[in-house]
Image (cartoon, rainbow, N blue to C red):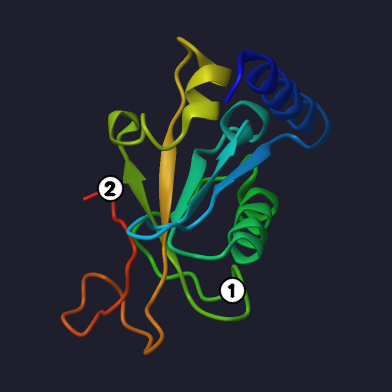
Amino acid sequence: MTDERKEKYFKKVNTNIEKFGFHITYVLEETGFTPFGYSTGIYKSFGIPELFISGLPNGLTTELIVNYAERFKFKKVPLNQKINDLIDRFPVYFIEVENNKLTEHTLSSFKFYENSVFKYLQLIFPDLNGFFPNESEYNYDQEILGE
């Protein structure tokens, strides 16, 4: 990416944060690479951790991040507990992720926050049979960074 394109992109990130309170970045799937999406600005705007999601398509990732921000802004986010109504398709739960495990994934956030403190959670979802990663029957390509 050229410097001009980077500058244009980060201007868009900042504009979305000013307008909506956050920006969503989505990185597409490639051969041998799990897609992921993440928020930037939620921590600063709403006082809750940013959200990282691995292995879901763009539209679903976006819907989950928007629902998360709306539901939990200025509230305590429950960790390691199933949440059955963040989306009508399946339950989820949130785990903490150390920022140093996300440095190569969440570049927009690291640039936005620079030397400021910010936190991340990862949204964990079940496989197509309803099993979560901590269950032996789980079978899906979801990169778990918080463990």
| Amino acid on which the number 2 mark rests in the picture | Gly
Left/right placement of residue 37 relative to residue 97 reads right
In the rendered image, the residue lying farthest to the right is: 19
Q: Nearer the viewer, residue 8 or 102?
A: 8
The secondary element bearing badge 2 is classed as loop
Counting residues from the start of the chain, the first of labels 2 and 1 encountered is 1
CA neighbours of label 2 inside 10 A, class few (<14), some (14 to 19), many (20+): some
Residue 84 versus residue 146 in the image, above or below: below
How far across and down, in percent of the image, does residue 60 sit?
Answer: 61, 66
In the rendered image, the residue lying farthest to the bottom is: 129
Residue 78 versus residue 17 in the image, above or below: below
Which residue corresponds to mark 2? 146
Quadrant the N terminus occupies: top right
| Amino acid on which the number 1 mark rests in the picture | Asp
How far across and down, in percent of the image, does residue 123 sit?
Answer: 44, 57
* Residue plotted at (41% across, 85% down): 128
Which residue corresponds to mark 1? 85
